[in-house]
Image (cartoon, coloured by chain):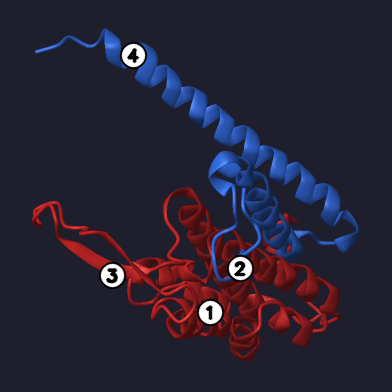
Chain colours: A blue, B red
Amino acid sequence: MNMVAYLPMLEPLPGVEHWWMLLIIPLSFGIALIYKAARVPSLDQIWRATGVMTVQILLSMVAIAIGFLILVQVVVPLLPVD
Amino acid sequence: MSESAETASSTIRNPRAGLLAWLLPGLGHAMLGDRRRGMLAGGGVIGLFLLGILIGGIDVVDRREDGLWFVAQAGAGPIAWVADAANAALVANGRFGGMIEAPHPNPMAPPDAVVMVPAFKGVAHPNEMGTLFCAMAGLMNVFLVIDAMSRRPAGAAP
């Protein structure tokens, strides 16, 4: 990976195409932080609430992915062809 | 009382706080006396937006080419217009990196047809994820704007 000429913010981050799926973690964390910052009654609970919501989002995404995997790999091949 | 019922309702109490929340994410909550809440929420919006630009390059905010995405990104406030202007001034015109030939995007075009695109144009996953980060920042700031408009000022009697 050549990073000599890399200009942050002007061009895409080098190497993202190899680990782009992991970006769902900071995305989920950011969404959870913003939501909980507005919603928790006391900010003392915010980091715990944000962590819980981040995990909930990630587990939901994994569950949806498993659901689609079963649909595509198991259910669709069972459908009659014609 | 539930969380949502305690902090928000459908009543618009503070249109000015909503406007400030759009101008600078978190400022609406800070104006209502909840400075720490505003810093956390606003920091989250600005952090997501800047992370999107870091991932995909400034090209992820492009009002002309990705108009529908920009509708969502514009929820983050003037920062979206600044990013779009920076993209137009620095990258889209080839000032940084120059222009390169690329295959014509229209599949019906002749095989040897080419178009000129900026060398720093983002493509594939980095561009998609960067665009998504900025769009989510904008949509979450719309949520903050609505929350700031309907929230009672800190310390106010219910």
Subunit of label 2: B
| Residue at the image position 37 percent from the left and 11 percent from the top | A74
Most distant residue in the right direction: A44
Q: Indicate which disc, 2 or 3, sits on the residue closer to the N terminus.
A: 2
Q: CA distance from mark 2 to mark 1?
A: 10 Å
Most distant residue in the bottom direction: B16
Subunit of label 1: B
* Both labels 2 and 1 in a single chain: yes
Residue A25 image position (x, y, % from top left): 67, 45
The residue indicated by pointer 2 is B49
Q: CA distance from mark 3 to mark 1?
A: 22 Å
Q: Indicate which disc, 2 or 1, sits on the residue closer to the N terminus.
A: 2
Q: Nearer the viewer, mark 4 or mark 3?
A: 3
Q: CA distance from mark 2 to mark 3?
A: 28 Å
**Cβ atoms under marks 2 and 4 closer than 8 Å:** no
| Residue at the image position 42 percent from the left and 75 percent from the top | B98
Question: Please, what is the three-letter code of the amino acid marked with disc 3?
Answer: Met
Q: Nearer the viewer, mark 2 or mark 3?
A: 3
The residue indicated by pointer 3 is B116
- Which dot marks residue A75? 4
**Cβ atoms under marks 1 and 4 closer than 8 Å:** no
Question: Please, what is the three-letter code of the amino acid marked with disc 2?
Answer: Phe
Q: CA distance from mark 2 to mark 4?
A: 39 Å
Subunit of label 4: A
Circle 4: element type: helix
Circle 2: element type: helix
**Cβ atoms under marks 2 and 1 closer than 8 Å:** yes
Question: Please, what is the three-letter code of the amino acid marked with disc 4?
Answer: Val
Residue A9 image position (x, y, % from top left): 60, 69
Q: In the image, B132: left or right of B27? A: left
Work out which quarter of the rendered image holds the C terminus of chain B and state it.
Answer: bottom right
Subunit of label 3: B
